[in-house]
Amino acid sequence: MRCGAARFRAFFVSLSVVALLATGASAALRVPQVAVMSGSLQSYFNGVGESINAWTDQNAVQAWQASDKSLYLIFEYSGNAAANAIGIYNASLPAPPLYQVFPGDVTPGWWAFAEFRTAPNRLIVSLFDGDANLQGFTTYPGADPTNFAYYLQGSGDLYYTQDSRNPGGVARALAYAGTGSNSGQWWLCWEDGDDQDFDDSVVFMEWYAPTPVSKTTWGALKKRFR
């Protein structure tokens, strides 16, 4: 999809920035780097003041741990990207349930507040419209703040940040480490079609730290749970 016509941006901001801030090192760069077939994602990074090279700075991280338990989420939609929903799943499970954070059928300006809680683990998502009117809340039992990843679900398609879960092991999301004032933060850039521009959804994640990427295959991972 074209960057200006069919993309939504999502800004994830933690409300408490010190309580559980992880201090682990960043994951290494992807090897090999994934081909990005247009300059629209690079133009986006340039426009928000990032010193990121969309073709050479792709990070290998595919799962995260929360640096804090509270998240504030704002989504801006344009074009057909409103058909996409984004959520969280437990990265360690072979067939994880999907915890939808933001649906794909809302209007611009809607936002959500999500909070991880423990004992037992659960994720509580409260959804608001553009006028800050509560539209509902959902509790998802079992959400693990120490090892989770993201999914994007469109019209019949479901993609994951973990390559091994996607058909053919194809990368559908590219992670980039923030630079400058965004150092220590993350950008997550999705491809929901076939044009390989990775600008169909751009997500900014603040106060997260990457869980190191496992050097195993999805088949090997499944065997662990048999």
Image (cartoon, rainbow, N blue to C red):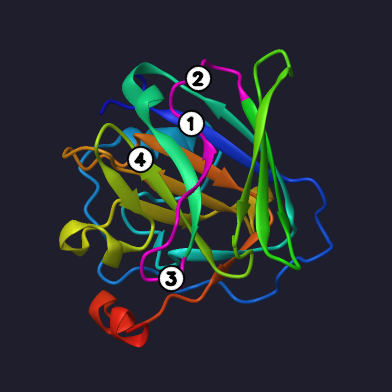
* Labelled pair 4, 2 in contact (Cβ < 8 Å): no
Residue 153 circle label: 4
As for residue 199 lying within the magenta part, the answer is no
- Please give the range of residues in magenta: 91-110
Residue 214 circle label: none
Looking at the magenta stretch, what is its main secondary structure?
loop
Amino acid type, callout 2: Val
Q: Earlier in the sequence, mark 3 or mark 2?
A: 3
Q: Disc 4 versus disc 3: distance between alpha carbons?
A: 18 Å
Write the residue at 78% across / 66% down. 20
Q: Which residue is mark 2?
A: 106
As for residue 108 lying within the magenta part, the answer is yes
Q: Which residue is mark 3?
A: 93
Amino acid type, callout 4: Gln
* Labelled pair 3, 1 in contact (Cβ < 8 Å): no
Q: Earlier in the sequence, mark 4 or mark 2?
A: 2
Which element carries disc 2, helix, strand or loop?
Answer: loop
Q: Disc 3 versus disc 2: distance between alpha carbons?
A: 29 Å
